[in-house]
Image (spheres, grey):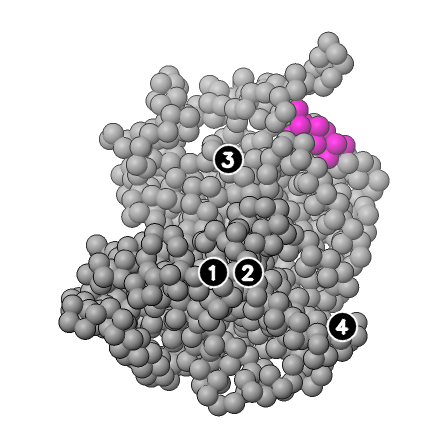
Amino acid sequence: MKQEASHFDYLDGVRGIAAFSVTLHHFFYAFLPALIWGAAGNKGLIVPQLEMAIAQTPLNILWSGDYAVMVFFVMSAFVLTYRFFRDQHEPDFSRVSFLTSATLRRYPRLVLPIFAASLIVLLVMQMGGLFHQQAAQYSLSFEWLALQWHTPNAGFVDVLRNSFLEVPFKPEPRYNNVLWTICIEFYGSLLAFALVAVLGRQSWRGWGYLALGWYLGNSPYLCFVMGVALADLMYAPGAAKVRTILSRPAAYWILAIAGLYLGSFPKGIDASQNIWFSWLYWLDGGSMSNAQWTHNWGALFLLLAVLHAPSWQALLSRQPWRWLGRISFSMYLMHGLFLGSICSWLIVTLVPSIGYAAAFVITLLVYLLAVFASSHFFARYIDEASVKFSRQAYTLLIGRKLEAFLPRWNTRWRSSLFVRREWGYLLFGILLMYVLFYAALKQPWFAHSGWDSYILQAQAWWQGRTMLAQDYPYLELAIFKGQYYVSFPPVPTIPQFLLYPFFGEGTPNHFLNSAYTILSFALLSFWFNPQAQLKQFCVPLAAVFGSNLLAVSLNGGVWFQAQVLAFLFTISAFFFAVKSQNRPWAMHLSALCLALAVGCRPFQLVYFPALLWIFAYHLGHIGNAAPKTKTPEGREDAEPLQQFLIFPILIGGALAWYNWLRFGNPIEFGHNYLPEFQRATEGQFSLSYVPENIMRSLRLPSFTPEGGLSFPRMDGVMFFLVNPIFLILARKLTQLKREFWQVNALLFAAIAIHMLATWSHRTMGGWQFGNRYFIDMIPAVVLLLWLNRSKFDGKDLMLALFGLGLNAYGALWLYLDWP
């Protein structure tokens, strides 16, 4: 079946009809609620019995707002992704460019018109133009109309916050209640792009759609999976026979009738005894506790029919329907305001004099005229302008640079580790390992650990505070001048801050730590083993899963989040540093990553001298590298190192300011104000702790009477036994390169200082498996192995596998409380 070159014009008609259905739904919700609620509440106003009866028949498809929204969602995912499946085999098509452009433009395309519409609502509110509460006394819409526009803090700043943050991310629409769908639309769009990125070129993607669809169940997000699958179906070579069958009139008529019938199911009404819908209760198992599935599948069936019905496409492509589609988003944004203003005013004014029936008809006519007229101008001057702005801003800021970068990226990607079959097998093994761990620990993937003060700090930030609202005795909180503060460096709060609008206090911190760890392993594998050679995996394996990082990655406690994120940032810093030849941007990124690592674990600061040495080496300050710039006099000179301190200075200044704001001390993160350290005679750090802590770092495990292996649960065990990458480094000491003696000395000195600082701490990490404080030093060990071009053999691989086995056992021992 031939499709348009660039656009499915007839889908504009479908979109316009769906938007019109939503406007009718809300009008009846406000002024004839019996058409929505049926007999519930006895809200009939004009012909009560008829109104309540119609609400329970398929006729309510004309104003089935929830169904129309599901049609929006399926169609949105389809329109956003069909170009990928249509053009992916074209020689000039770039998947990276397509997904980057579509993803980055989505947010401004949605929020800019929302901001404009909310400003109009604010203006009407300030002028006293809302009469919805008075109108609800006549229309009996106490559950909906009377509760709208409750905004005690209404103002321009609140509109900004609501439009750009709360509507797309939470959702909490205060100026236009119908915008609860925008949050689902935004996340669903990202889900659609992610599906295309991950599954778009996989031969087994159909199974992926099914698995994700089963997981989402009755969720509205299922519609976005359906939309992507529908776009795939339209262009997949293997689906030609299916498309032929669906193009038969009998097929698409059956689909359309089934889709409209399911879409007419009255959610919120008990239709179990209804002649039209009672059999659906039997199909659902008897309860219909969540009837969302009827609207989800009804939307899919309808669009399947429209996409394969040429005569319907011709009808929907006519100008009136396309115009309706063009103003559909504007209708969606503007119609709510008229319900609360002019429509409510008409009801309040006319009902006492001419009765409810006549007032209702006049109000409906005025409502439709106002919605159509305002939406036309809003679409022309605001909505279309925002689309144009988002496109031009992307092209100017990112698009041109990306187009220049993509040819080099594609060449490197096609020869990288991540397109090799071996990496796919390895990634599958890693994911399977985590599935087994989570199952053994009976820990849901997106569960939240309560031992997380970062989420409390994120909540405080959202509320404009640095201190917490109350004490949490089970957490390590700093107490300063009667206030409670998080006592850990704040950078790990940033991901929690971004996730808080979505998850509230229940962020999936277990999953976050596991994801950070897998990313660290992927980066190390790309760094050390681009050709997927077995022996070269010993360093990534020993550094990540063969170390105490494995146990830490399974729990989202506050202590573990800081360590895992610091590990990822430090590894990233060293990776970009060694790969930064002739790339100043990579040096800036490297310095930024290490500065962020310091904001997670302050002792990572000791590795900055080694990082600057690497920069100096690449720039020609050290060694035989040629200078990269010329002085005004024409003399060759190396680029100055000072420029790469910009990000560390900015990050350091922000951390110092935050510490001063809380504790009046730029270097105080709060640990000195923990009650346990205030009670300690020697304080938090003291050289007097060193001898005992060294002995703790060299303790051996023991055997239980039953023959099991047991470890000290508090303050550590022999660090190089549970982190054998230190043994791998010891085996490679004879391979150190004289050329790099300076950076070797800097790194060994940094590790020694780091160890001394660790041993000077009052505790060695508390409850744990192994000796988790030594995780922070592993990136420096990795860098030493890389810089000195260490050669690895089977013994190194055996050490890494030993570490994997021991740490897997130790993680289960710790979390399952084995003796």
Distance in Å between CA atoms under marks 3 and 2 = 47 Å
Amino acid type shown at disc 2:
Trp
Q: Quadrant of the C terminus?
A: top right
**First along the sequence among labels 1 and 3:** 1
Q: In the visual, does 130 lie left or right of 486?
A: left
Residue 188 is inside the magenta segment: no
| Residue tagged 1 | 56
Depth check, mark 4 against mark 2: the one in front is 2
Disc 4 or 2, which lies upstream in sequence? 4
Q: Does residue 141 appear in the picture of this structure?
A: yes
- Few, some or many C-alpha atoms within 10 Å of disc 2 (few <14, some 14-19, many ≥20)? some
Residue under label 3: 449
Q: Quadrant of residue 112?
A: bottom left
Q: Which residue is mark 4?
A: 242
Query: Residue 467: image x %, image y %?
Result: 30, 39
**Residue 785 x/y as whole percent:** 69, 45
Q: Is residue 78 above or below residue 326?
A: above
Q: In front: 707, or 385?
A: 385
Helix, strand or loop for disc 1: loop
Task: Kindly identify the amino acid type of the residue bearing the numbered disc 1.
Answer: Gln
